[in-house]
């Protein structure tokens, strides 16, 4: 970088455009509360200074997917003149994007020269810092599921036709147009290291797993991967959707969060060969925390009206407040691997969950179990399909989940009151819109007869 890199202005670092960045423009990106990527293009050209910060209107924290606003959303500044927030990023962190000559970089949000406490990345950073204060560094691996769609010639989307496709398939039989291959190739060019890709239970559903890594690095990569995959698909006339239950007759899509904890000696703190199920005290307490805050967790992990069509018994979707060893019908699954590979998998988050908030929520609920020295109940012994060893399950609607989140004072405090207040405001408005909507099903079912 040029020597004037270190010069600061009110708006952040300023560098000469006669720089070593090999891009014609850069794209600083951040994730909003709804999980949407927000960004700008910043040109890199001789004589045009490139700042390591840029501004956005803070009132985006009042905006819904349909572009309407919730004026009273806490933190949105709607009635305070809709002021700016600042998106700050590190020029050394700019990495190859998926468009020619465009570098991408993850930004952090600031307001009034302070980090924005309800920015999703800040919420995750706080969860990481809270674990570090206990002497542990969270490691995370995320499994993403998504459906591949094609135009239905009526202005909508339908599942891509893949006759003969089966679970755990690869190649043309599951990916006849080569879109998944293109996404994999682009991920490699962007430095987003995929560990595995395969078709899932219902075709054309796919699972994408990135390599295990420190929590923030993992979630940043997942955020970039999802956006890249969306854009690669759209430019080929297709659509990749991470919506939790896009089709009533097909299985749902999850965002399974796997985590472990490294101690100060870089040892996996979840493993204990002498402990019950070869799990350490901190592992058992972490699982107990996830179960204790199960209902409140659901609001963050399943943040859409649609998500609750996936969260039904028998769907292997993390419904029950239970845990088990290598048990896919348990919400908290502990795979059989031990030693350095010991990990805890949380199966409630769906494909539309904000990855920063979902991981933060899982980490904070687990940490509360350690903080409060919670006792772990017995593992699930049944099939946990239609019935389980517990009657506790995820709330049945988004409205009920939001009530559970608000009522869980310890979990709300751990996530941050600013984030929860903004989230509840937006999502309660979303629920109200859903209740007021007249659906195609209602028209088809009632109008011909009544």
Image: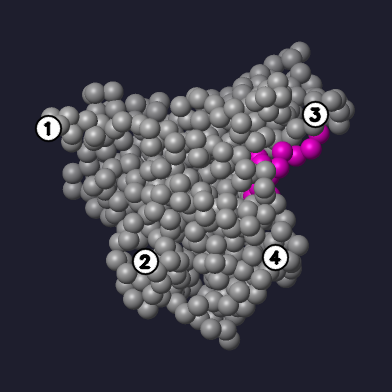
Residue located beneath label 1 in the image: 449
Are circles 1 and 3 on residues that touch, CB within 8 Å? no
Are circles 2 and 4 on residues that touch, CB within 8 Å? no
How far apart, in angstroms, are the residues tagged by discs 1 and 3? Answer: 64 Å
Residue 331: where, in percent of width, then height? 44, 64
Residue located beneath label 4 in the image: 136
Residue 168: where, in percent of width, then height? 31, 55
Residue 127: where, in percent of width, then height? 67, 55
User: Which quarter of the picture shows residue 432?
Assistant: top left
Q: Is residue 117 magenta?
A: yes
Residues in magenta, as a range: 113-125
How far apart, in angstroms, are the residues tagged by discs 4 and 1? Answer: 62 Å
Q: Earlier in the sequence, mark 1 or mark 3?
A: 3
Question: Secondary structure beneath disc 2?
Answer: loop
How far apart, in angstroms, are the residues tagged by discs 2 and 4? Answer: 29 Å
Q: Residues within 10 Å of mark 4 (few under 14, many from 20)?
A: many
Residue 216: where, in percent of width, then height? 63, 50
Residue located beneath label 3 in the image: 12
Viewer-nearest residue: 98 or 126: 126
Question: Secondary structure beneath disc 3?
Answer: strand
Q: Tell me the mark number nearer the camera, choosing from 2 and 4.
A: 2
Residue located beneath label 2 in the image: 329
């Amino acid at each position: 970088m040029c020597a004037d890199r270190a010069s600061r202005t009110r708006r952040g670092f300023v560098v000469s455009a006669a720089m070593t960045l090999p891009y014609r423009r850069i794209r600083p990106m951040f994730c909003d509360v709804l999980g949407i990527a927000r960004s700008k293009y910043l040109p890199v050209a001789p004589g045009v200074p490139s700042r390591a910060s840029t501004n956005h209107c803070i009132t985006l924290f009042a905006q819904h997917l349909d572009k309407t606003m919730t004026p009273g959303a806490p933190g949105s500044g709607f009635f305070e003149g809709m002021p700016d927030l600042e998106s700050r990023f590190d020029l050394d962190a700019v990495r190859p994007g998926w468009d020619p000559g465009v570098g991408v970089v993850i930004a952090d949000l600031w307001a009034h020269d302070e980090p924005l406490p309800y920015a999703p990345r800040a919420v995750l950073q706080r969860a990481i810092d809270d674990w570090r204060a206990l002497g542990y560094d969270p490691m995370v691996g995320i499994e993403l599921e998504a459906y591949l769609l094609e135009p239905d010639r009526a202005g909508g989307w339908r599942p891509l036709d893949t006759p003969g496709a089966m679970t755990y398939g690869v190649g043309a039989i599951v990916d006849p147009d080569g879109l998944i291959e293109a996404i994999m190739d682009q991920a490699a060019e962007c430095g987003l290291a995929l560990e595995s890709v395969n078709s899932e239970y219902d075709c054309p559903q796919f699972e994408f797993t990135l390599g295990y890594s420190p929590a923030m690095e993992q979630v940043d990569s997942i955020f970039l991967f999802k956006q890249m995959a969306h854009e690669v698909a759209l430019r080929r006339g297709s659509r990749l959707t991470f919506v939790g239950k896009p089709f009533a007759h097909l299985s749902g899509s999850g965002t399974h969060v796997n985590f472990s904890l490294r101690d100060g000696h870089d040892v996996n703190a979840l493993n204990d060969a002498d402990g019950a199920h070869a799990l350490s005290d901190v592992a058992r307490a972490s699982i107990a925390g996830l179960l204790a805050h199960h209902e409140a967790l659901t609001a963050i992990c399943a943040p859409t009206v649609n998500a609750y069509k996936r969260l039904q018994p028998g769907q292997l979707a993390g419904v029950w407040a239970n845990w088990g060893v290598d048990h896919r019908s348990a919400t908290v699954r502990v795979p059989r691997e031990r030693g350095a590979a010991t990990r805890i998998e949380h199966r409630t988050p769906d494909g539309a969950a904000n990855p920063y908030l979902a991981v933060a929520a899982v980490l904070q609920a687990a940490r509360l179990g350690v903080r409060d020295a919670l006792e772990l109940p017995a593992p699930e012994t049944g099939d946990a399909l239609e019935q389980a060893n517990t009657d506790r399950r995820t709330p049945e609607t988004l409205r009920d989940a939001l009530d559970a989140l608000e009522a869980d004072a310890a979990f709300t405090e751990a996530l941050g009151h600013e984030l929860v207040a903004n989230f509840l405001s937006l999502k309660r408005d979303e629920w109200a819109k859903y209740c007021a909507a007249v659906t195609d099903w209602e028209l088809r079912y009632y109008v011909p007869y009544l």
